[in-house]
Amino acid sequence: MTTTHDIAIIGAGPVGGTLALALAARGQRVLLVDRADLTPMEDEAFDGRAYAIAAGSKVVMEWAGIWDELPYAPCPILDIDVTDGKLGRAPSPLKLHFDHRDVGEDPFGWIIEARSIRIALNQALHTAPNLTLRAPAEALVERSDAQVRLRVGEEEFTAKLVVAAEGRKSALREQARIGLTRLPYHQTGVIFAIAHERPHNNVALEHFLPGGPFAVLPMTGTAEHPNVSAIVFTERDAAAQKLYAMPDEPFLAEVEKRLGNRLGRIALAGRRWLYPLSAQYAARYYDTRLVLVGDAAHGVHPIAGQGLNLGFQDAEALVRILDGAEDPGAPALLARYQAARRPINLAMLMGMDTLDRLFSTNFPPIRLARDLGLAAVERLPGLKKRFMRAAMGR
Ligand SMILES: Cc1cc2nc3c(=O)[nH]c(=O)nc-3n(C[C@H](O)[C@H](O)[C@H](O)COP(=O)(O)OP(=O)(O)OC[C@H]3O[C@@H](n4cnc5c(N)ncnc54)[C@H](O)[C@@H]3O)c2cc1C
């Protein structure tokens, strides 16, 4: 027996899962397939991984009904410090300070634990009306001008549109022969959390160093660790591997070299994670009855924590464009989605790339130019506000 749906989504990561819930909430019949086991009541221990979620990403999480279900409170980001530095020097003198009050009442965004999004999503995916979830499972997908046919194990489904949300190595993107451009960085991020003596006061820090950016993101405290922050410590590949393998004491000494004592005494909270960094972008966002969202369409440098935000904004655009559509796979709608999202995502990707290249050098004229640039932005309130609104996804 063949079951008919409006939209099939392959990949229930944060973007595919949120999109599925938001579409189903508007009455679309959605089939969602993921090869991972999405246990409904998953409650893993604190592991230190977190996302910076811009204010503009909140709306699609609300449509999906997961914002109010996050089991661990998001930590608002009220101020952002951006500093430039040399290895071994604490992040001072301060070059740029962004205060959320300069652009309104709302915070710049929130730091949300990755497990918090996962738990809220997994619970909702198992109970949402209009949503058929198959996980762990894989789908064989055949697309034609008329429809999409999917085989999942013994079951057959049809849909009018299939959404590729399988992340950076999207099989559907490859099947459709959509070109991909990769920008390797030869940098790796060491991700972890620290418990610290002094409160972070909801301030995020982006400290640019020649090896790569060092970001400190304020997190909501736990009973065990009342003051806690997530750190993305980017270094050249070999140096990052060394850091990852170091015993705790010398590793923390390396962290202190970059952090100074702005947070007082520090200790590790949870384990370390290693992420090789690269950027990539797809040549097109759609094909016959196929559309790409999230990391399947674009992967950016995590320098400004925008990767998932761009994916949430793809999901928001797609929900708006497909709302009430009789045929959600109609080429004109998919072209509208591409026109709405690809130029913005590409501009963000290129901006992050330029920032990384600009700050990953010790070449004196470039150092001088970027120091003058940071100082100039600090003195130009209009330009600062534009940066702040862009960071908030507005
Ligand atoms: C070090 C680092 C730090 C980051 N920090 C931030 C941050 O602070 N803020 C931010 O916004 N972003 C951040 N990002 C980016 C963010 O992690 C990604 O943009 C985000 O995970 C993309 O979500 P997605 O749902 O598109 O893809 P993914 O998270 O990759 O999910 C893909 C899903 O598809 C499934 N899948 C894959 N292939 C198949 C298949 N063939 N069949 C069925 N299922 C399949 C997988 O099991 C998975 O569930 C960071 C990234 C890195 C590397």
Image (spheres, helix red, strand yellow):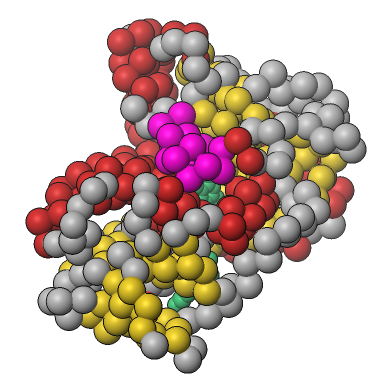
Residue 261, x across and y down, in percent: 76, 25
Identified at 23% across, 80% down, the residue is 143
Q: If the image is split into quadrants, where does the N terminus sit?
A: bottom left
Q: Give the left or right position of residue 12, taking residue 194 as reference.
A: left
Report whether residue 19 is seen. no
Q: Give the left or right position of residue 97, taking residue 383 as reference.
A: right
Q: If the image is split into quadrants, where does the C terminus sit?
A: top left
Residue 82, x across and y down, in percent: 51, 25
Q: Give the left or right position of residue 375, taking residue 286 as reference.
A: right
The magenta segment: 52-67
Residue in front for this viewpoint, 105 or 255:
105
176 versus 370 height, above or below: below
Question: Does the magenta-highlighted stretch encompass residue 57?
Answer: yes
Residue in front for this viewpoint, 62 or 309:
62
Residue in front for this viewpoint, 202 or 20:
20
Residue 393, x across and y down, in percent: 37, 32
Report whether residue 248 is seen. yes
Question: Does the magenta-highlighted stretch encompass residue 291?
Answer: no
160 versus 380 height, above or below: below
120 versus 277 height, above or below: above
Q: Give the left or right position of residue 117, taking residue 212 as reference.
A: right
Q: Residue furthest front?
A: 1
Identified at 85% across, 26% down, the residue is 197
Identified at 26% across, 47% down, the residue is 323
Residue 114, x across and y down, in percent: 63, 49
Identified at 72% across, 48% down, the residue is 48
- Residue 39: name its quadrant: bottom right
| Number of marks present in the image shown | 0
Task: Give the main secondary structure, helix, strand or loop, of the magenta stretch.
Answer: helix
